[in-house]
């Protein structure tokens, strides 16, 4: 299972509902009577296991040492964290 965002040509925070992305975004409600400035967009990740009904047999695995570093044995369930609020270098 390849990660959709971060690949060349795809926007990291794409709102296109026609393709899968584990990055979700929403804008908190801001009343015109609220004395604080608006927060803007909030981002959150959904884990890949939410989109897998069951664990299929013979999933591709990481080597044992790499699996310990990544926190999972199966490549399809690996989900690295990328900070959405940090400036991206182009």
Image (spheres, rainbow, N blue to C red):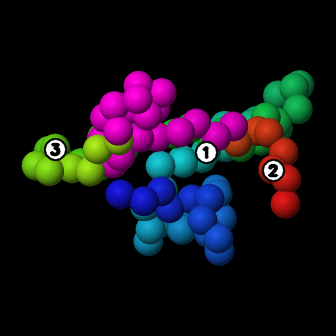
**Residue at screen point 70% across, 42% down:** 84
Q: From mark 2 to mark 3, how far is it between C-alphas?
A: 34 Å
Task: Specify the farthest residue to the left.
Answer: 57
| Quadrant in the picture for residue 5 | bottom right
SS under mark 2: loop
- Check whether the beta carbons of the residues at disc 2 and disc 3 lie within 8 A of each other: no
- What percent of the width, then of the height, locates residue 74? 30, 41
First in residue order: circle 2 vs circle 1: 1
Which residue is identified by label 1?
26
**Residue at screen point 85% across, 53% down:** 89
Q: Which part of the image, by quadrant, shows the N terminus?
A: bottom left
| 88 and 73: which is toward the camera | 73
Q: Residues within 10 Å of mark 3 (few under 14, many from 20)?
A: few
- Check whether the beta carbons of the residues at disc 2 and disc 1 lie within 8 A of each other: no
SS under mark 3: loop
Q: From mark 2 to mark 1, how far is it between C-alphas?
A: 20 Å
Let me know if residue 27 is in the magenta part: no
- Check whether the beta carbons of the residues at disc 1 and disc 3 lie within 8 A of each other: no
Left or right: residue 32 versus residue 65 is right
Query: Looking at the rendered structure, which numbered label has been put on residue 68?
Result: none
Let me know if residue 81 is in the magenta part: yes
First in residue order: circle 2 vs circle 3: 3
Q: Residues within 10 Å of mark 1 (few under 14, many from 20)?
A: few
| 34 and 6: which is toward the camera | 6
Magenta span: 63-83
**Residue at screen point 47% across, 57% down:** 3
Query: Looking at the rendered structure, which numbered label has been put on residue 88?
Result: 2
Which residue is identified by label 3?
55
């Amino acid at each position: 299972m390849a990660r959709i965002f971060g690949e060349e040509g795809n926007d990291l925070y794409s709102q296109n509902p026609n393709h899968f992305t584990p990055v979700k975004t929403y804008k908190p409600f801001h009343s015109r009577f609220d004395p604080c400035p608006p927060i803007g967009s909030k981002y959150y990740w959904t884990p890949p296991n939410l989109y897998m009904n069951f664990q299929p047999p013979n999933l591709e695995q990481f080597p044992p040492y790499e699996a310990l570093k990544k926190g999972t044995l199966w490549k399809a369930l690996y989900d690295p964290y990328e900070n959405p609020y940090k400036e991206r270098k182009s």
